[in-house]
Amino acid sequence: MSSIIENRQITVGVTGSIAAYKIVDVVSKLVQQGAVVDVAMTSAAVNFISPLTFQSLTGREPYVDMWGVHGVKGEAHIELARRTELMLIAPATASTMASLAHGFADDFVTLTALATKAPLLISPAMDSQMWDHDATQANLKLLRERGAHFIGPEQGRLASGQIGTGRLSESQKIIATMKACLGKLEGDFSGKTVIVTAGGTREAIDPVRYIGNRSSGKMGNALAEAARDRGADVVLITTVPETAPEAIQVIPVESANEMESSISDYVTKAEVLVMAAAVADYRVNMESEQKIKREHMKSFSLDLIANKDIIASIDANLIKVAFAAETEDLITNAKKKLRDKNVDLVIANSVTGEASAFGSDTNKITIVDNQGNAEELPVLSKYICAMEILDRISNLVGADSYKEEGSSSN
Ligand code: CTP
């Protein structure tokens, strides 16, 4: 399956910051993922990194000299601006931000940014004192108001040795934000809110211990990432926020009750809910406020009470997708869950096979729909599984008006 980046015309504007060397990695990854990357550089950027580096990676001559002949008819910056689908400026210096905010076009980067209609992503890098300066903050505000998107800057160690805000974001975050941006341009989930739950809930016994399960959260993360790449506004409600993909709204939770309450905050705004989380069916009736000591534990039993079946209890008008992780009678159990939970799709997977074991990067799923179909897919990476699931959801979202008519005529 092709990546959202594949064959896309991307312009990367590099300006004069020591962080310029980090953009080599971004450009390299974009090219590896099939993008057609043009690099524009300011003359200050050339002090930090050679155009030859970018030429070697992209196979295309970087745009540096505003007055040079670029082998194109007409003006090179206009030609570049017209075919650019997304423009990233990284690292963006304070001076470049000022030029962009005020419409100056005094180098190839700002010239192209002024001429293009493509979305503009700006990833600043500078010393924290420059970032905090009122002038830079005013320029940031102006650019945001005009629709530019910002990635970072991050907090951390700066070139000066000081700790502060001004570090260029990591490559992974920059590329994730680019994918989200491209997804929003023409993805089939653009304008739709998709809630994904991930991980296994933790039901507290005392402040130290909990009842948990083996879910890694990888399938939920893959779904969130794939939905982001297809333009959705993703809300990822997860027990493993530290592993969440970039450029996604992440709501960390622990218990089933917390998960339910976070879902209810978003459910009325969402078009889709995918419950990939492994939710505990029971919680401890009386959580101990203090750590339970060993001397009290010669014989010990926990009083458990049932948690609500979250997905079954949601009555909102949205597409609901449940998972069924089973060790036996996969399809029978999945079909029963589809009926009992009143959902549109059930993604069944046997957790006994190696390819779909907990924590695996692959999965072997069967998609069960409410027409009685059970479609078995081969072993695939979790991201590709997610794309397959989203294809089925996309058909259902397209049939949304049908769903509304159907429910009102019942
Ligand atoms: N689920 C839920 N709320 C719960 C339990 C499960 O919303 N309290 C959701 C899960 O996120 C999953 C689906 O229901 O999408 C099936 O979960 P699973 O644990 O396989 O099934 P259960 O309904 O708990 O049934 P059983 O444990 O008997 O298999």
Image (cartoon, helix red, strand yellow):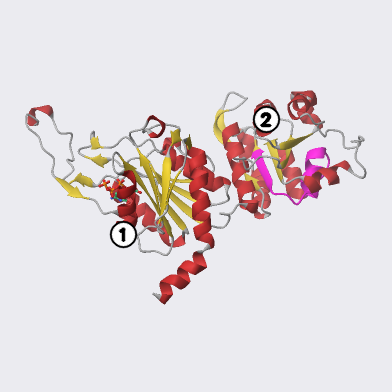
Tell me the kind of residue under disc 2.
Ile
- What is the quadrant of residue 97 in the picture? top right
Say if 193 sits above or below 290 in the image. Answer: below
- Residue 38: x %, y % from top left: 77, 36
Q: Quadrant of the N terminus?
A: top right
**Magenta stretch: residue 175 in it?**
no
Stretch in magenta: 103-123
Instruction: Give the distance between the C-alpha atoms of the residues marked 2 and 1, in whole angstroms.
Output: 47 Å
Q: Secondary structure at mark 2?
A: helix
* Residue denoted by label 1: 313
The foreground one among 117 and 67 is: 117
Tell me the kind of residue under disc 1.
Ser
Asked whether residue 248 appears in the rendered view, the answer is no
> Within 10 angstroms of label 1, few (less than 14), some, or many (20 or more) residues?
few
Badge 1 residue CB within 8 Å of ligand 1: yes
- Residue 11: x %, y % from top left: 74, 39
